[in-house]
Amino acid sequence: MLSLGPIIFGLILGIIIGSQIKLNNNDTHFTLGAFVIVLIAGLIVAWQSGNYPFYTDLPISTAFLSALIGIFVGKLIFARSK
Amino acid sequence: MSQGSIILKLISLPISIILICLGVMTILGGHITPGGGFQGGAMIASGIILSVLVYGIGNSPLELSHLYIEVLESVGALGFVIFGLIGLFVGGFYLYNVGTDLLNVVPQAIQTVFHYPDVTNAGIIPYLNIFVGLKVFAGLSAIAIAFAGFKKYVEEGE
C-alpha cells in the first residue's frame, strides 16, 4: 500500500521552500537545463537512499522525490522576482 | 560581500536544493528513523546558509524575506502548541497522541483526523516533527541571514 503521508507533506514542505527561489538577480544564469540536471541528480539520490523511512511500497525515497518536485513546483508557481 | 568563485556559484544552488530535500526526508522519517524535526530543520537551514554564504546576502537565489521567516516561525510554534492543546482537551493530557490513542479515550472520528497516513500508526508525532522542523529551519536561517546582513552593513560603513 502506498504511504501518502511523506508524499503529501514532502510536496507541501517543498512548495513552501521552493517559493523563495529567485534566479534573476545573481550573476550565474541557471536555465531550464540546469534544473533538469538537478532533477536527474535528485532521482539518483532518491534511488540510492532506497525506501528510506522503511516503507516498502516503492524502491525509492518518496519523501525526497516529492520534496524535489515540490521545490520545482513552488519555484515555477509562487517564486516572484525581487 | 560575495566571495565565491564561478565554480562555487555554479554548484552551490544544486547542492542547496539536494540538501533541502535531504532535510525534508529526515523530517518525514523522524518517527521511525534517527533524526526528526530539529535535525531535518538544521539540514534545510544548511542549504539556505550555503547559498547565502556563496552568493552573498543581496544576490542569493535562496534568500528568505523577513515576513516569510516570521510566518514560518509562528506557524511552527503555534502548530506545536495547538496540537498539545488538542491532546489536553480531547485526551486529558498535554500533547496526548490523539492519532494513536493508547488509552482509548478519544472518539474514532477525531482519531481518524489526526492519524498520519502511513503504515506505522504514529499518530501526531510526524506532524509535531514537521512543525519543529519549520521552526528550526526558520530560526537557524534567520541567524545566518542576520550575521550576513551585519557583515555587509559593517563593510559598507568602512
Image: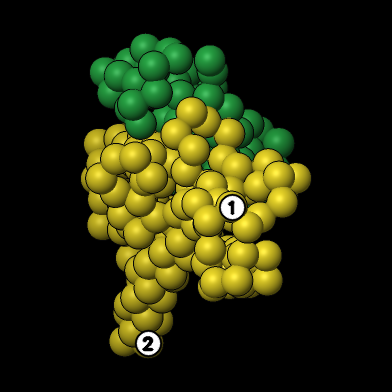
Chain colours: A green, B yellow
What is the quadrant of residue B112 in the picture? top right
Query: Vertically, is B80 above or below A38?
Result: below
Residue A52 at x, y percent in the picture = 33, 27
Q: Is residue B43 left or right of residue A38?
A: left
Residue A67 at x, y percent in the picture = 50, 34
Furthest-bottom residue in this view: B157
Q: Quadrant of the C terminus of chain A?
A: bottom right
Q: Which mark is residue A65?
A: none
What is the quadrant of residue B77 in the picture? bottom right
Q: Which mark is residue B104?
A: 1
| Residue at horizontal 42 percent and vertical 30 percent from the top | A64
Residue B17 at x, y percent in the picture = 41, 38
Which SS class for mark 1? loop
- Amino acid type at circle 2 is Gly
Which SS class for mark 2? helix
Q: Nearer the viewer, residue A59 or B96?
A: B96
User: Mark 2 sits on what residue?
Assistant: B157
Residue B6 at x, y percent in the picture = 28, 40
| Residue at horizontal 66 percent and vertical 55 percent from the top | B106
- Amino acid type at circle 1 is Asn
| Residue at horizontal 45 percent and vertical 34 percent from the top | B120
Q: Is residue A66 left or right of residue B143?
A: right
- Asked if residue B126 shows in the view, the reply is yes
Q: Is residue B55 left or right of residue B117?
A: left
Furthest-front residue in this view: B104
Looking at the image, tell me whether mark 2 or mark 1 is earlier in sequence order. Answer: 1
How packed mark 1 is, by other alpha carbons closer than 10 Å (few <14, some 14-19, many 20 or more), is few
Query: Vertically, is A41 above or below B101?
Result: above
Q: Nearer the viewer, residue B36 or B102?
A: B102
Residue depth check, mark 2 versus mark 1: number of the one nearer the observer: 1
